[in-house]
Image: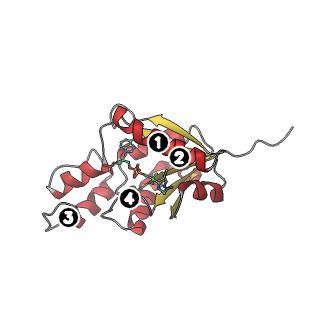
Amino acid sequence: MAALKERIGIYPGTFDPITVGHLDIIRRALRVVDRLIIGVAQDTGKAPIFDMQMRSKLVEADIATFGADAKRVEVRQFSGLLVNFAEESGAKVVIRGLRAVSDFEYEFQMACMNSRLKHDIETVFLTASEDTHFISSRFVKQIARLGGDISTFVSPNVAKHLSEHFKGTNTWN
Ligand code: COA
């Protein structure tokens, strides 16, 4: 009997910063794939407050709390096209989280564009859990900047870095 091939998935994002919404998707993606590569993207069309190194470090620190499952997750940075990164990584599955109908159009377009670029890469959507589906990195940053409580949206480590980042500032990022 042929040996079963390991199923590798990519979960790409800006992760500026990683939230409990992302962590929920990562945990559930590990039920679907054998190994998950979290791709921290350079080219996202967004203007992140944290550079790629810091965004990756924050993701790694949160993954380290996963226990045994952390061994199946790898955090990597990438620039350029997601489909090229997926191919180089040997991944055939791109995981994305869907929060609401409002996400659908953007995600659907991106999945179709990626599929046109590389036919053999499939996007798998996981619906966000009901207790995290409203979380957005943008609002988390806004609340942190305005001194609000973000402890239920991000890990204590991310909360610490956000409050350090916004210490003494009152401008919108
Ligand atoms: N629960 C709660 N929130 C969630 C969530 C979930 N399950 N999943 C995502 N989110 C939120 C995030 O907090 C974030 O909020 P924000 O918009 O307020 O910042 C938002 O949804 C999505 O951000 P993120 O998950 O970091 O992904 P992204 O949409 O920024 O990622 C890339 C985009 C990286 C996948 C895309 O730009 C890309 O592929 N870039 C590479 C270049 C390329 O190939 N381009 C062609 C694409 S067709």
- Name the residue at 41% across, 36% down: 104
- Residue 24, placed above or below residue 85: above
N-term-proximal mark, 3 vs 1: 1
Q: Where residue 79 appears, x then y in whole percent? A: 50, 65
Categorize mark 4 by other alpha carbons within 10 Å: few (<14), some (14-19), many (20+).
few
Q: Where residue 27 appears, x then y in whole percent? A: 48, 42
Task: In the rendered structure, find residue 113 and report the number of the disc placed on it.
Answer: 2
**Camera-side mark, 3 or 2:** 2
Is residue 74 in sight in this rendering? no
**Camera-side mark, 4 or 2:** 2
N-term-proximal mark, 1 vs 4: 4
Residue with the mark numbered 3? 166
Q: Amino acid at mark 3?
A: Phe
Q: Is mark 1 within 8 Å of ligand 1?
A: yes
Q: Amino acid at mark 1?
A: Gln
State the separation of the CA atoms marked 1 and 4.
15 Å
State the separation of the CA atoms marked 1 and 2.
6 Å
Categorize mark 1 by other alpha carbons within 10 Å: few (<14), some (14-19), many (20+).
few
- Name the residue at 64% across, 55% down: 87
Q: Amino acid at mark 2?
A: Met
State the separation of the CA atoms marked 3 and 2.
36 Å
State the separation of the CA atoms marked 4 and 2.
16 Å
Q: Is mark 4 within 8 Å of ligand 1?
A: yes
Q: Is mark 2 within 8 Å of ligand 1?
A: yes
- Say which of 17 and 60 sits in front: 17
Say what secondary structure mark 4 lies in: loop
Say what secondary structure mark 3 lies in: helix
Say what secondary structure mark 2 lies in: helix
Residue with the mark numbered 1? 109
State the separation of the CA atoms marked 4 and 3.
22 Å
